[in-house]
Image (cartoon, rainbow, N blue to C red):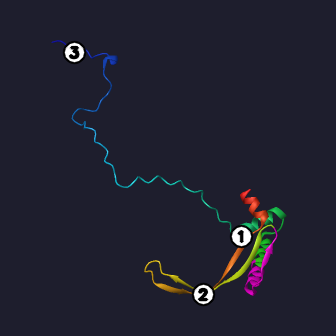
Amino acid sequence: MALKKPAPAAAKPAAKAPAAKSVAPVAKAKSAAPVAKAKVAAPKQVTISQKQMAAELADAHELERRDTGALLDGLVEVLVAHLRKGDRLRLAGLGILQVRDSPARAGRNPATGEQIQIAAKRKIVFRPAKELKEALIG
């Protein structure tokens, strides 16, 4: 009885898939719609609360956090009171806040195309200061 010697490793062909499992290559079907490209995720936007701003101001100016919090609360109250009266608020280095009246107008319902009446309203408008624009845009 003769024993078979294994073939040397160098003589073996590269590993292939078994013949029984091999499938003929399938031609790619062209689709009618183009493939959408993956969207690049926008950087996550951080929201800073009034409490966090008070903490930053307190640390920067060596004040109590509750004092800076009360100061910011008072600032918001003053701003709201003046905007209700219709005053224009100019904050140096930040911009101008004011209330504008928007008149009633005709519009259309986008779903039905039906003409509708849009009521008059008041809206808050902010116009950034030149310094703010330059700091953000360059």
| Numbered tag placed on residue 4 in the rendering | 3
Task: Look at the image and give the residue range highlighted in magenta.
Answer: 76-92
Which SS class for mark 1? Answer: helix
The quadrant holding residue 2 is: top left
Judge depth for marks 2 and 1 and give the one in front: 2
Say which of 67 and 53 sits in front.
53
Q: Quadrant of the C terminus?
A: bottom right
Q: Amino acid at mark 3?
A: Lys
Query: Which residue has dot 2 on it?
Result: 104
Q: Residue at x 29, y 42 (%)?
A: 27
The quadrant holding residue 58 is: bottom right
Q: Residue at x 53, y 82 (%)?
A: 107
Q: Amino acid at mark 1?
A: Lys
Report x, y in % for residue 134. 76, 60
Q: Is residue 99 left or right of residue 61?
A: left
Residues under labels 3 and 2: Cα distance? Answer: 98 Å
Q: Residues within 10 Å of mark 3 (few under 14, many from 20)?
A: few
Q: Residue at x 68, y 78 (%)?
A: 124
Q: Residue at x 34, y 52 (%)?
A: 31
Say which of 114 and 63 sits in front.
114
Residues under labels 2 and 1: Cα distance? Answer: 38 Å
Q: Is residue 4 left or right of residue 80?
A: left
Question: Who comes first in sequence, dot 1 or dot 3?
Answer: 3
Query: Which residue has dot 1 on it?
Result: 51
Judge depth for marks 1 and 3 and give the one in front: 1
| Residue lying furthest top | 2
Residues under labels 1 and 3: Cα distance? Answer: 83 Å
- The question of residue 132 being in magenta is answered with no
